[in-house]
Image: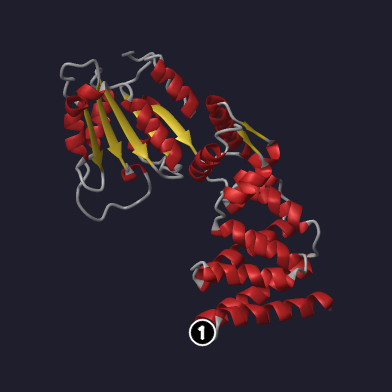
Amino acid sequence: MQGKDYEIMPLSVAQLEEQLQQHQLAPVYLIQGQDHYLLKQVRQAFLSLIDPADRTLNFAQYDMREAPLATALDDARNVPFFGTYRLVMIDDAYFLTGETQHSKPNHDLSQLLEYLSHPEPQTLLVLFAPYEKLDSRKKVTKQLKERAVYVPFGKLTERDLRQFVQARLDKQGYNMSMEAQTALLNLTNFSLTQIMAELTKLMLYAEQSHTIDLQTVRDLVTKTLSQNVFDLIDQLLKQHLRQAVELYHELLINGEEPLRIQAAILSQFRLLVQVKASTLSEQGLAKALKVHPYRIKLAKQTVRRYRYATLGRAYLGLIRLEEQLKSTQRDPELLFELFILRYQATVRE
């Protein structure tokens, strides 16, 4: 294992995997990000360094919601048994965030600071922080970012997602059109975890031809609530009111709760109104609203066709609909149909 010459600048997941494959190893790693697919991929990359026959003796993991930090660090100080490395994983390192610790176990962060000064050279200590942000004001967070190999993966861009998809396709020897890839991203709400799960299904279906086209994606990929709501709003704005009511009916039939549907519709419409009113760039607006940049891109394409007043009246009508859903026992589908009638009347004004 390398000494103090290892890379301490932030790394991408791909760079980390390359270093691990080449056995360019460091004693301490900090992994920050929320995507389950990438977290699983990173975990597996570290596990592959430990021979399966040695994992009982040379691998341990500790959940910080259940085990004291001191116990994990004591384990990290042990040398490996009959192996080259010892791997210790610290899961859910919430003490690196702004979260206040209210219950046991108690974590003595000074011990982690001490360990960072003198890490066990034959141990790989990997801290997983599955959060969007860490509290950089904390000394322990600052020290980790300075002394550990830091691998952050925040919200993935459209380009990032396409690269992961293409890499998977290339590895398995599949072809997929750009239109099909775009549809896959849209239908999975830009979640890499969902994208990879659906891609596995698509590859299985196209096992003979090794070609995935747009129609296959449309037929096989399971729509999220967000995508169904996006379609519903699209039909509403296009004045395809019967289709909008039918989509709402289908959501209810499929077991979606009326208030959950309403919250999703309101959230999407609020985004449309905000995008219509804003003069910021796509990236600037995505950062300000804390949403994926690709959602801003799609919203901008949508709002170009409509006046702000039209969007605003629809949004106010949806707010009134939500109030009725919460305050009356009337049938949700009937209330939605009444909203459609009022919306139709305002559009004609």
Left or right of 34, for residue 163: right
Residue 175 picture location, percent across and down:
63, 31
Left or right of 82, for residue 153: right
Identity of the residue furthest to the right in this view: 349
Label 1 element class? helix
- Residue under the image location 44 percent in, 30 percent down: 151
Q: Nearer the viewer, residue 106 or 1?
A: 1
Q: Nearer the viewer, residue 11 or 9?
A: 11
**Relative vertical location of residue 76 with respect to residue 322 in this rendering, above or below:** above
Left or right of 342, for residue 59: left
> Based on the displayed image, in which of its 4 quarters is residue 334 positioned?
bottom right
**Relative vertical location of residue 101 with respect to residue 113 in this rendering, above or below:** below
**Residue highlighted by disc 1:** 327
Q: Callout 1: 10 Å neighbours few (<14), some, many (20+)? A: few
Q: Nearer the viewer, residue 325 or 196?
A: 196
Identity, as a three-letter code, of the amino acid under mark 1: Ser
The answer, for residue 162, to whether it is visible in the render is yes
- Residue under the image location 20 percent in, 22 percent down: 54
> Based on the displayed image, in which of its 4 quarters is residue 47 positioned?
top left
Residue 343 picture location, percent across and down:
73, 76
- In what quadrant of the picture does the C terminus appear? bottom right
Q: Nearer the viewer, residue 85 or 258?
A: 258
Residue 234 picture location, percent across and down:
71, 61
Identity of the residue furthest to the front in this view: 208
Residue 9 picture location, percent across and down:
46, 24
- In what quadrant of the picture does the N terminus appear? top left
**Relative vertical location of residue 194 with respect to residue 58 in this rendering, above or below:** below
User: How are the colours assigned in the image?
Assistant: secondary structure
- Residue under the image location 45 percent in, 36 percent down: 38
